Image: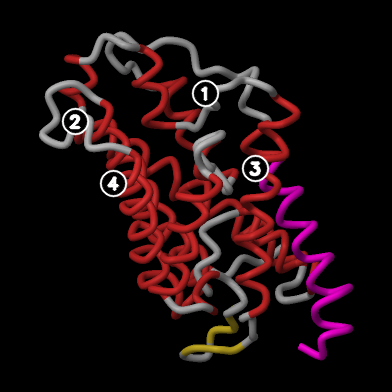
Amino acid sequence: MEFNINIMIAEIFGTGLLILLGDGVVAGVLLAKSKSNSAGWIVITAAWAFAVFVGVVVAGPISGAHLNPAVTIGLAVTGGITWGQVPEYLIAEFIGAFIGAILVTVHYWDHFKATEDKGLKLAVFSTGPNIRNLPLNFISEVIGTFVLVFVILTFGTNGSSNGVTIAKGGMAALGALPVALLVFVIGMSLGGTTGYAINPARDLGPRIIHAILPIPGKGESDWAYSWVPVAGPIVGGVLAAVVYVGVWRNYMGM
């Protein structure tokens, strides 16, 4: 298997910036003695939206800015990319997520030390529900990711940039600002149940970093829940792709 290094670098930088800024706002709002402590849910959802904006601006012209395994797999289902391209995207997305989470840890190190609540420290890195009901939590992630991937697919086209074949059916298909608004409304409308991972790399990558780094006073990484923000988004992305191909593209003439 031959990887496209340009696509991988773009996805690493795009996903890394996404996690740095997204997990960064959560750290700022939740950790003790941060100037943005207790700023609230709207601040978190807005900053995550603009973190996506940054990631799309950086990676979009080269890789299409998937930044998310659910998007990548959804595009493979529709034929937007080949299944042979999927590994290079997934590897790069997780590498980027690892790097972003490490940078957040370093940036907020003193604030992790100043925070006593172990649950707040974990929440910087990964999502979790306020009402723990795994089947419904799973469904929440499926629904949120379905909306994300379906809207992206309705804008998707293939193209090339500087001689590098890309899949503009990624988040770059919408443009940086529209996809940021899409993520913002998903967070505001559907994110209150589970924290809207809607991205396996966004949750599992930082969760692994939480588990392996010597973060002061950290607790467990809640592996019993960890399958939900991985499986839910993948199922949601696949369902979005199936509905797009089977209904929207075939019957709506799109």
Count the numbered circles shown: 4
Q: Main secondary structure of the magenta part?
A: helix
N-terminal label among 3 and 2:
2
Q: CA distance from mark 4 to mark 3?
A: 21 Å
Label 1: which residue? 130
For label 1, count other residues whose C-alpha is less than 10 Å away and answer few (under 14), some (14-19) or many (20+).
few
Residue in the foreground of this view, choosing between 129 and 204: 129
Q: Label 4 to label 1, Cα distance in Å?
A: 18 Å
Q: Earlier in the sequence, mark 4 or mark 3?
A: 4
Kindly identify the amino acid type of the residue bearing the numbered disc 1.
Answer: Asn
The amino acid type found where label 2 is placed reads Asn
How far apart are the alpha carbons under marks 1 and 3?
14 Å
* Residue that badge 4 annotates: 43
Q: Label 2: which residue? A: 37
Q: Is residue 25 above or below residue 109?
A: below
- Horizontally, residue 218 falls left or right of residue 141, namely left
Q: Amino acid at mark 4?
A: Val
Residue type at mark 3 is: Glu
The residue carrying mark 3 is: 141
Which of the 4 quarters of the picture holds residue 73?
bottom right
